[in-house]
Amino acid sequence: MVKTMRGQARITESNVQDMLREVRMALLEADVALPVVRDFIARVKERALGAEVATSLTPGQVLVSIVQKELAATMGEGVADLNLATQPPAIILMAGLQGAGKTTTTAKLTRHLIERRKKKVLTVSADVYRPAAIEQLKTVTKQAGGEWFPSTGEQKPRDIALAALDYARKHFFDVLIVDTAGRLAIDEALMAEIRDLHATLDPVETLFVVDAMQGQDAINTARAFKEALPLTGIVLTKLDGDSRGGAALSVRQITGAPIKFAGVSEKIDGLEVFDADRHAGRVLGMGDIVALVEEVQKGVDIQAAQKLAEKVKGGGDFDLDDFLAQISQMKKMGGLSGLIDKLPTEIAAKAGQADMDKAERDVRRMEGIIRSMTPLERRKPELIKASRKRRIATGAGVQVQEVNRLLNQFEQMQTMMKKMKGGGLMKMMKRFGG
Ligand code: GDP
C-alpha cells in the first residue's frame, strides 16, 4: 500500500531526483519565482546528497525535513520585530505599489505599536496625488487609536514629511509612520520621489509592503524597490487569500531584507509577526509533498476497508496506520462534505462553519503528521514521547501541539472503534461511502 524507500542508508542522486521534482513543482505552484526556485533546489540538493538517513527514517522523510528547514532559513529564522532604537521619533517609511496595502498596514502598525509596545504614534500621508488616500489614512489612524497629521495635494511630499517630523518632535511622539504614494507599476518618478523622502527623513525602518497575491510579479517589484531604497523589512499582505504565499521566498531572496509582518485580514488587527517556520509548511503544502514522496495508492480500497473491519472485529488493535488509511479513504470517498458531520473530531465543528477548505487542509495536515511517523510509531503510538513528537512535527512542518492534537483525536477514534467491534465498522464505512 505505502511504498517507502526504507533500507537505503543514504540519499543518492537517483532517489532524490523524483522527490526534488515534486518540491520544485510545489514551489512553482506556490508562485515562487523561477530563478529563486532554481537556487533553492540547488541548495537543498547539495545538503541532501550524502545526508545520513537514520534507520528509523525513510530518505523521503529526511528530504522533507531538509526542505522544510532550508525554506524556513531562506525566509528568515526567528522573528524580526520593528527596530525603534533611535532618538525619538523613530521614523518608519512605507514603500510599495498602489494597492499593496501600505495605508492599511500603516494603521495596523499604529495599533501594534500602541498596544504591544506602548508607543505614541503619529501618521502622515505623503500621497499628494490621491486626496482620497490622505482621507483614508485619517480614518484608519483614528480607528487604530493613533494621531494623524494633516496634509494636502498642494504640498510637496518632502515638505509634508518635514512638517510632520517637526510636529512629532515638538509633541514627543515615539514613532512617526510616513505613508507614501504608490503607482500601479514601477516608474522612475515614483522611485525618485521616495528616494528623496528617504534622504530627507533618514528613517530607522524602511518597510517594503508587498501583496502576497502578486505571485510571480512580486520579484520585479521587489527588485525595483531594493535598487531604490535600503530596505530594512518586508510586510507581506493579503496572506489570508488563497495564495500559498510563495512571494515570501522570492521577495526575501531578492531584497535580502527580513519579512517582519504578515497581513492576514482587512481589519486593523489583521497583522501578525511573520513566522518563517509556519510559513514554510504553507508554501510547500507539506501534506501534498509527503504524500507524493511516499506514494499512497489512489482510489478507494475496499479490500483495505474490509481488512480493517475484520481486524477490529477480531480484536486487533486500531493503530495509526489504520487511522491514516481511514483518513485517506474518507477523502477519496467523495470528498469531505458528505461525511464531515460523522467525523468525531474538531473537523466536524469546522464544517459547521462551512469552512470546507480549512477542513480539507486539516485532513492533509493530519496525513502529513502520520506520514512523518515511523511504522513502529504508527503501530505503537504510546512510544511517541517528547523527542519523537518534535521530530514528527519538523518532518510534517507543523507545531508540536498539532501532533498532540492528532494523537488525542486518534485516541478518541480508537475508543470509538473498540465500542464498534461487532460489525459496526463496515456499516460505518459504507455510510461514509454513500
Ligand atoms: P495602498 O494603496 O498600498 O495604501 O493599499 P491599501 O492599504 O489601500 O490596501 C488596498 C486594499 O487591500 C484595501 O482594500 C485593503 O483593505 C486591502 N488589504 C490590505 N491589506 C490586506 C490584508 O492583509 N488582507 C486583506 N484581505 N486585504 C488587505
Image (cartoon, helix red, strand yellow):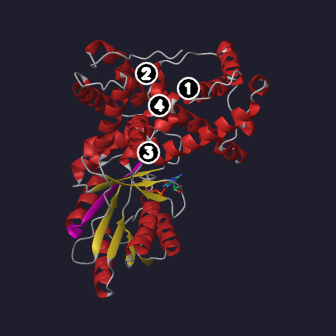
Classify the position of the C terminus by image quarter.
top right
Q: CA distance from mark 1 to mark 2?
A: 17 Å
Residue identified by numbered label 3: 212
The label on residue 426 is: none
Q: Identify the mark nearer the N-term, 1 or 3.
A: 3
Tag 4 residue: 377
> Distance of mark 3 from mark 4, alpha carbons?
38 Å
- Magenta segment includes 208: yes
Mark 1 → mark 3, Cα distance in angstroms:
37 Å
Comes first in the chain, label 3 or label 4: 3
44 is higher (above) or lower (below) than 125: above
**Magenta segment:** 200-211
Q: CA distance from mark 3 to mark 2?
A: 27 Å
Q: Are marks 2 and 4 in contact (CB under 8 Å)?
A: no
| Residue 214 sits above or below residue 115 on the image | above
Ligand 1 within 8 Å, label 3 CB = no
Q: Which residue is mark 1?
A: 321
Instruction: Farthest residue to the front: give it.
Output: 315
Above or below, comparing residue 293 to residue 363 in the picture: above
| Secondary structure type for disc 2 | helix
Q: Residue sitting at 51 percent across and 29 percent down?
A: 378
Q: Residue at x 31, y 57 (%)?
A: 80
